[in-house]
Image (tube, coloured by chain):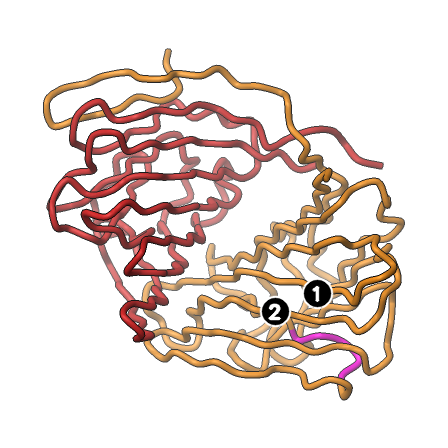
Chain colours: A red, B orange
Amino acid sequence: MPAGATYDKIATTTLTSAGSIDLSSIPSTYTDLVVVLRGKSSGSTNNIRLRFNGDTASNYSNLRFLAYSGTADSNAQTNMTSAGIGDWGSIEGAAIINIFSYANTTTWKNYASRSVEPDYTSMYSGQWRSTSAINQITILYPSGSLATGTTATIYGIARA
Amino acid sequence: MPLLTTQSAKGYGFSNLVSATAVTSYESIATAMGTGSSRTITFSSIPSTFKHLQLRIMAQGNGPGGYPTSLESFRLNGDTGSNYATHNMIVDNNITTTQAGNSYPTNNAADFFYLPGADSSFYGNVIIDILDYTNTNKTKVLKNIAGSDRNGSAAKGRVAMNSMMWNNTDAINSITIVGDSTYHGNWSTSSSFALYGIKG
């Protein structure tokens, strides 16, 4: 029998000035997290990324599958100080990031994301090599800023 | 304490803070955990009261891992007939591949996604959408997004989008996932398989 309703909206925010988005004090009461992003870069930077718990060490990696201008491409990034989640530049884009078992303290954390904007479609699988529970997510451009008006909504999914 | 804040180049600000809400059409049906001694996970007696299903997996096996031969088998309603087909878009590290996986009607289960074998705290993940699963007028189609990234380690990283057909119009009432016997092995005890229903 179904165990009950879930997929709860935890919070949403809209940037009131260019910068990064910091999702903090995330409750540990869910199994997975979903972050829905809508926005663009304030400049020409086009690789949007995340960090967990403010960790700026080289503990991130990701695989990217990218289609743009009629071309399919892919790459692996290792020992990074942030992890890729999408590809938008100065044109409005959207991304959905799924973060699995974020509160467990046994496994390294991994995520899957999909990103779209008119010129780029991409899919990521990434990892944060830490067994810490995730309580903070920062969405950023390492060498740029998210534009004013960029919106993030975070949801929690609890399993039976 | 706010749950969510924005950090801008000009300072800190808060906008559109919203409290958690319980209104949702997404419900948890059941969760199965790996036992360390079995490579089979089964969800049975799936209720027919939803429009769609979603299965969210974070798992590893206790075998040596490796791909593409360690694809996990996916079977619906216990059907062992040659009724399954899959197509895949895959990135194995830097190599992009598209392929037809199982070619209908030659397989008795769908090789639907890859998950890693035993390797420290390294797990893979899959989200499977099972659409209109009770409709008896439609052949069933499924899709997933799957990933496992291991900091560039060859033979362990993969991101993929896969589709699957089960050439049957029966309502789906059970799902069976079987780990590859040679490379994957039994599901570890931290492996999680969570089934959700979505109302339509």
Q: Secondary structure at mark 1?
A: strand
Rendered image quadrant of residue B81:
bottom right
Q: Nearer the viewer, residue A19 or B117?
A: A19
Q: Which residue is mark 2?
A: B163
Residue A84 inside the magenta-drawn segment: no
* Residue B4 vertical position relative to residue A120 in the rendered view, above or below: above
Q: Quadrant of the C terminus of chain A?
A: top right
- Give the number of the disc on residue A91: none
Label 2 lies in what chain?
A: B
Q: Main secondary structure of the magenta part?
A: loop
- The chain containing the residue under callout 1 comes to B
| Image quadrant containing the N terminus of chain A | top right
Q: Horizontal and vertical percent for residue A95? A: 38, 47
C-alpha separation, residue under disc 1 versus residue under disc 2: 7 Å
Q: Nearer the viewer, residue A22 or B36?
A: A22
Marks 1 and 2 in Cβ contact (< 8 Å): yes
**Earlier-in-chain disc, 1 versus 2:** 1
- Which residue occupies 44% across, 81% down? B97
- Residue B183 drawn at (x, y percent): 60, 77
The percent position of residue B74, horizontal first and vertical second, equals 72, 68
Which residue sits at x=19%, y=44%? Answer: A141
Residue range highlighted in magenta: B107-111
Three-letter amino acid code of the residue under disc 1: Val
Give the residue number, with chain letter if any, for mark 1.
B141
- Badge 2 marks a residue whose secondary structure is strand
Does the magenta segment cover residue B108?
yes
